[in-house]
Amino acid sequence: MNTTFRFIVLEGIDGSGTTTQLECLAKLLRADGNAVVTTSEPTPGPVGRLLRQALEGSLSPDVDGCSQFDWVTLALLFAADRANHAQSLIVPTLAQGKVLLCDRYDLSSRIYQSVTAADPEAALPWLCILNERVPRPDLTLVLDIEPELAEKRRSTRGAPPELFEQNQLQRKLARAYCEAEKYVPNDRLKHIPGELSISEVTERLYAACQSGVG
Ligand code: TMP
């Protein structure tokens, strides 16, 4: 059955399974005859590549030793990467009537950058304004997971922890994702239990994509 949702976003803390689920969900939707494009943020574009370096801690230090970005700089870069993503891929894909599945979008900015700001309450309205020119998703699917389980999953990857992959911060982020509606009050959002098996999570995501049908 074709889904009526066109722009679908997967969200959650690091290790919640959004990247794995993106292709699993795309496969099920394609089997139904939907033309599906998958994408992710940060993007592989120029701003996204800079963000990856910041996340991995591999920015080249300049003469003043400024090799780390604060939350404001990161918020601006994530918003710039998203604007470029919207213009180059999101808008044209949606205009072709295709389904676009995106691993992370501005809910990540609203949650990660506000939670890491000195004053999260004051940061949120600014983050919303910063991202107000990009299209709104039709459906955002949040993978809720115990931070301890996500931590175990991340440690089996064997890669060094990225910028936000600190256990205490991930617990705060998990609490924020549980109340994700607060961050995107006008969007359609559904929570999916992320601790289920990969195939069970995919089934739940798929069912959520069908809930707009009929
Ligand atoms: P990922 O490879 O797990 O998607 O990693 C991206 C990291 O960047 C993850 O820790 C979430 C973070 N992030 C933000 O802080 N703000 C954003 O807007 C986005 C898209 C990601």
Image (spheres, helix red, strand yellow):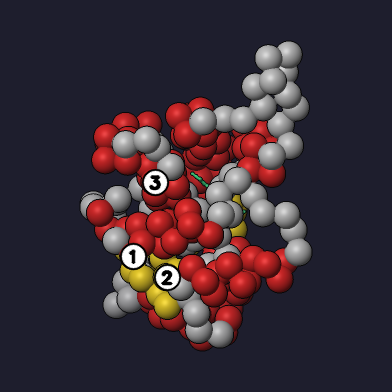
Q: Which mark is residue 178?
A: 1
Q: Residue at x 29, y 77 (%)?
A: 214
Residue 154 lies left or right of residue 204; in this view the side is: right
User: Between residues 139 and 118, which one lies in front from this camera angle?
Assistant: 118
Q: Which mark is residue 115?
A: 3
Q: Residue at x 61, y 72 (%)?
A: 152
Indicate the amino acid at tag 2.
Asp
Quadrant assignment for the N terminus? bottom left
Residue 193 lies left or right of residue 153; in this view the side is: left
Measured as percent of width and height from the top left, residue 121 is found at 26, 40
Q: Secondary structure at mark 3?
A: helix
Circle 1 or circle 3, nearest the eye: 3
Query: Can see residue 101?
Result: no
Query: How much space separates mark 1 and mark 3, taking CA atoms?
Result: 13 Å
Q: Which mark is residue 144?
A: 2
Quick one: label 2 or label 1, which is nearer the N terminus? 2
Query: Can see residue 157?
Result: yes
Indicate the amino acid at tag 1.
Cys
Tell me whether circle 3 and circle 2 mark residues in contact (CB < 8 Å): no
Indicate the amino acid at tag 3.
Val
Q: State which quadrant residue 24 falls in.
A: bottom right
Estimate how packed mark 3 is, as few (under 14), some (14 to 19) or many (20 or more) residues with alpha carbons within 10 Å.
some
Q: Secondary structure at mark 1?
A: helix
Q: Residue at x 75, y 27 (%)?
A: 60
Q: Is residue 104 above or below residue 69?
A: below
User: Between residues 20 and 66, which one lies in front from this camera angle?
Assistant: 66
Measured as percent of width and height from the top left, residue 74 is found at 52, 33
Q: Secondary structure at mark 2?
A: strand
Tell me whether circle 2 and circle 1 mark residues in contact (CB < 8 Å): yes
Q: Which mark is residue 78?
A: none
User: Between residues 156 and 203, which one lies in front from this camera angle?
Assistant: 156
